[in-house]
Each structure stands twice: as structure tokens, then as C-alpha cells.
Image (tube, rainbow, N blue to C red):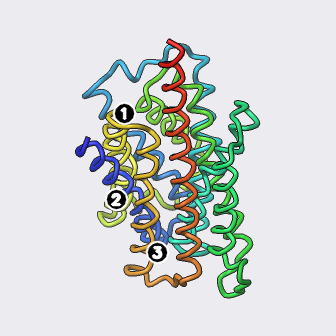
Amino acid sequence: MRKAFLAIILGAALWGTIGWYVKNLYSLGFTPMEVVTLRAWSAALILVIYLIITSPSKLKLKSLSDIKYFIGTGIFSIIFFNYCMFTAIDLSTIPVATALLYTAPAFVTIFSFFLFKEPLTGPKLIALLITLAGTALIVGLVPLDMSVFSLSAIMFGLGSGVGYALYSIFSKFALKKYSSLSITTYTFIVAAVTLMPFFPYEDKFFLLMDPTILFYVLGLGFLPTSFAYIIYTYGLNRTEASKASILTTIEPVVATIIGIYIFEEPFSLTQLVGMICIIGAVIVIQTNVRNRKKNLFAQKRYIN
């Protein structure tokens, strides 16, 4: 169990380093959409190679029609949420963009209510209100701080939360037939193929020959993407999903440290309180999920 927890924490911590790679690629002349493309391609190649070596059977499609699941996770989630998140980083700061990304569990709760008829319990409603309050503090809406408030950054930041939430929704259908690692691999394959027309090969392909740029591109596709997901999946398979989700809240903490201490980005006490609210809401939602499962299990035992 300890190894599983460490694997989950390490994976989430690596996710928190995404902003470092993104910021450096921006400084080297790439746009948010180009960085999304580079991440998708490098991650897809690494994951395919990994599965060919370790488990080729996981690369087999059970049915060609199943590609619809990966169009959902690849285009409507990964491409959309990455573009929104990377644009939010460009328009604001790494801590703010990452905090807004963590509104995703609140969106999952709302989507699940409408799509899967999952009940909006008291703890879930409390978590939604805490998320709303935390978001208002993070973006400078409460108290109104025009030096922080940016409508574009807010919209892209919340868009990343919606896109991230959609991954859980679409993958819920795919998990009936595929492993989580297979879903992620096909997700990045679909995303990479879809993004092919959006990269200016004639203008910037030569830049990929630069060792520094290649380091950031492969690093982005490997450490905070492929490797992070592989070790996170390792830990997830050995512990409860709700516990794993709580442990992943280390991601915004790492991202905030990188933003403040490496890129010297501003981050006020009010924004810190807002981030704590959002992380607290994630913990409330996941703790509620775990308690519901325990109660259902107890009821089944009583009935039996």
C-alpha cells in the first residue's frame, strides 16, 4: 500500500511540472496549440512503444466502432483541456491555471447528475459551493482585484476543468471494454492524428532538431505525461480510486511552487485560500464517494 501511495503522489507531482515545460517551450517560440500537438505526439509515441514492449494485446481494438470513445477522450477532452490549460498558463500564471483545472471534479459531479442520474448529495453540494468560492478567490473576483482578474484567463482556465472532466465521462464508457492504460494510449493517438494539420511543419519542424527544444518536447511527453500516467495507474490498481484522487491534490501544490520560485509569478494570500478551498472540495467529493461505497457494501452484507 505504501508503494502504491508513493507511486500516485509521484505521478501527480510530475503532472504538476507540466507548466515548467510549457513555459520554456513558449519562450522558444511555440504557441499553445503547437505545444498541445507536441505533447500529444511525443506521449503517443512513448505509450505505443511501452505497450508494444510490455503488453501488445492492450493495443488491439475490440471493435472499430469503439474509436468513438477515443474521439471523445482524445478530441473533446485531451485536445480541448490541454489547449485551454496551456492558454490559461500563457494568459495568467501556472498556479492560477492549475487551480482552475482542479475545478474538474465539480464539473464531473454536475455532468454525472445529468448524464448518469447520480444523486447530488449534501456533501457534493457543499463541495460545489466551496469550489465556486475558491474559484472566485483565485481569479480575483472576490475581492475584486483588477490586477489579477482576467476574463480570458478565467474562461480558458474553467474550460480546462470542463475538458478534464469530460475525460472521466467518456472513459467511463470505454472502461467497460478497455484497461485505463489502453484508453490513455488510444486517446493520445487520436489526439496526435487530429492535430497533424495544426502544426506549421515548414516553419518550425527544423526547431525540433535543436537539442534544447527536443529535451523539452520529449520531457513533456515522457515525465509529466507517459511516465506519470504509468506509475499513477500502477498505484491506482493497488488502492481505492477515491484515495488516489485525494493524493493527486499534490499536483497544484507542485505547480504553485514551480510558478512562484522558478518563474517568480505573483501569488497572493487570497489566491492561496482559494486554492485550498478548491483542493478541499476535491477531498470532500472523494471522501463522500468512499463513504457511499462503504455504506452500500455494509447494506449488501446485511441483506445477504
Task: Answer few, some or many: residues within 10 Å of disc 2's Cα (few below 14, many 20 plus, some between 14 and 19).
Answer: some
Q: Name the side, left or right, on which 217 lies relative to 292.
A: left
Q: CA distance from mark 3 to mark 2?
A: 14 Å
Along the line of sight, which residue is nearer the eye, 276 or 164? 276
Query: Mark 3 — residue?
Result: 27
Where is 288 relative to 138, above or below?
A: above
185 or 204, which is in the foreground?
185
State the separation of the CA atoms marked 2 and 1: 19 Å
Residue 197 % position (x, y): 60, 46
Amino acid residing under circle 3:
Ser
What residue appears at the point 53 percent right and 32 percent down from the top-left corner? 295
If you read the primary sequence from the N terminus, does the residue marked by circle 2 or circle 1 appear first? 1
User: Residue 5, relative to residue 57: is it above or below?
Assistant: below
Please give left or right for residue 288 compared with residue 130 in the image. Answer: left
Which residue sits at x=54%, y=83%?
269
Measured as percent of width and height from the top left, residue 156 is found at: 67, 62
Amino acid under label 1?
Answer: Val
Q: Residue at x 44, y 84 (%)?
A: 264
> Badge 1: few (under 14), some or many (20 or more) residues near its Cα, within 10 Å?
many
Sequence-first tag of 3 and 2: 3
SS for tag 3? helix
* Residue that carries the numbered disc 1 in the rendered image: 48
